[in-house]
Image: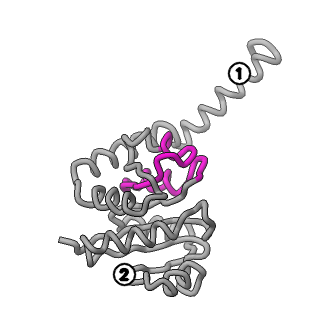
Amino acid sequence: DSGGVSIATVLNGWGSLKNPKAAIKAFAILRRALPAAEMYMYGTDFDEGGIAAQWARSNGLTQNIQFCGFLPRHDLHRELRNMTMLLHPSVEEACPLALLEAMALGLPIVAHATAGGVPWVLDNGRAGFLTDMRDIQAVARTTLDCITNAGSREQKSRSAFSRVVELFSPAKVAEQYENMYDKVLSYHYGRI
């Protein structure tokens, strides 16, 4: 059954490091297996008249893609709660907020296996599906696996939620800053 599949991307900009063309091309391939699947693209440059929509139109790749543009965080989170998964095609990232927010929402993620901090954020694949985002066929296969393999998808989503709570919750981040301040102060002034 291909109904009810909603794939989200959240990208800030059309630049090559964000790699949105790969997401659009891989989605076209994915639709061969899941013709009713839909993709919703959020972020700057992804509004209906924006550069992403223009590029997709000029390449005949707009079918079942909604160009939603930038949304305030609260509205974006409300939309993401209704998605099947997040496709994060970026090929270079440090610690992407889009992944952390998706993890906190329990949304399964497909992302680049070597994009800076992405593999670490996704616990080297235990908290998300990692693939080569420069290989459009691999992106389509991994996305299809995420959608169709319920057991793996649910396990990775649970691991992702636990990881984001353990490492990135406000209390944990504050604790990490306090520990760093203690180290710096004890180094410079001895134990306080």
Where does residue 148 sit, x and y in percent of width and height? 23, 59
Q: Residue furthest top?
A: 190
Local crowd size for mark 1, using a 10 Å CA cut-off: few (<14), some (14–19), many (≥20): some
Where does residue 140 sit, x and y in percent of width and height? 35, 63
Q: Is residue 132 above or below residue 144?
A: above
The reply, left or right, for residue 82 in relation to residue 20 is left
Residue in the image at 51% along x and 70% along y: 21
Q: Are marks 2 and 1 in contact (CB under 8 Å)?
A: no
Image quarter of the C terminus: top right
Toward which corner of the image does residue 65 lie, by quadrant? bottom left
Q: Earlier in the sequence, mark 2 or mark 1?
A: 2
Q: Is residue 17 above or below residue 37?
A: above
Q: Is residue 150 magenta?
A: no
Which region of the structure is painted magenta? 92-121
* Label 1: which secondary element: helix
Residue in the image at 61% along x and 64% along y: 16
- At label 2, which amino acid type do we have? Asn
Toward which corner of the image does residue 91 lie, by quadrant? bottom right
Where does residue 95 sit, x and y in percent of width and height? 58, 47
Where does residue 23 sit, x and y in percent of width and height? 45, 67
Residue in the image at 26% along x and 77% along y: 35
Q: Which residue is mark 1?
A: 183
The reply, left or right, for residue 45 in relation to residue 103 is right
Residue in the image at 52% along x and 68% along y: 20
Q: Which residue is mark 2?
A: 64
* Label 2: which secondary element: loop
Q: Is residue 158 or residue 6 the one in the foreground?
A: 6
